[in-house]
Image (tube, rainbow, N blue to C red):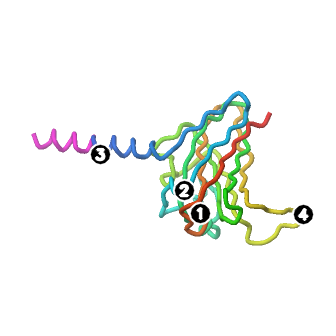
Amino acid sequence: MKFIIFFFLNLHITVMSFAQQDSNIKWIEMPATNVVSVSGDLAEGNFISDISWAWNSAVACFPQTQSRKFTGHHVLYAIDLPAYTEYEIWVEPSDKNANFSIYAYQVGTISTNNTVPNLSSCIRCEADHKWDYKKRGQVQDHTRRVKDILATTSPYQVLIGVVGAEGLAMGGFQLHIKKKL
């Protein structure tokens, strides 16, 4: 009898952890117009205390030296990436002085085993954040943009993290995704 109770208790905890993880991800559908925008707020997200997944060599999203730019609330979105498709993804903070960052990574199928902070590897990961120094011939504004999110012969799923830099936990934004034709 104790075994059965223990078994069902563990099963309940496992199911609840999967349900909780999935509820933190907001799914986006790409409309026929090939451009989608969604509104969000960092207050809807959560802190991720361990972001060492990002500089793991099997992920290589951003270097550890840039970790402070990903210490605020993470708001997670997901979208399907069909074969032979490329996306450009950018976030535009409502407050032009707010310091936001963004990352996007591709996986076969999003699950609790490959959702941050449990990400041990991915197909590709791209990130953008406020620059430490000016870059010759380039100007950075308040938007953060990731490119080269693409699929060739196989479809993928993309997880997008909109993040407050340096502990930022509140602030509205628009997330834009454009299918490049």
Query: Please, what is the three-letter code of the amino acid marked with disc 1?
Result: Phe
Magenta extent: 1-11
Q: Which mark is residue 13?
A: 3
- The earlier-in-sequence mark between 2 and 4 is 2
- Horizontal and vertical percent for residue 78? 57, 41
| Circle 3 SS class | helix
- Direction from residue 42 to residue 30 in the image, left or right: right
Q: Is residue 134 magenta?
A: no
Q: Which mark is residue 137?
A: 4
- Horizontal and vertical percent for residue 131? 74, 67
Residue reaching furthest to the top: 32
What separation in Å lies between label 4 and label 1 (alpha carbons)? 26 Å
Local crowd at mark 2 within 10 Å, few (<14), some, or many (≥20)?
many
Query: Please, what is the three-letter code of the amino acid marked with disc 3?
Result: Ile
- Horizontal and vertical percent for residue 180? 78, 37
Residue at which label 2 appears: 74
Query: Please, what is the three-letter code of the amino acid marked with disc 2?
Result: His
**Residue 170, placed above or below residue 124:** below
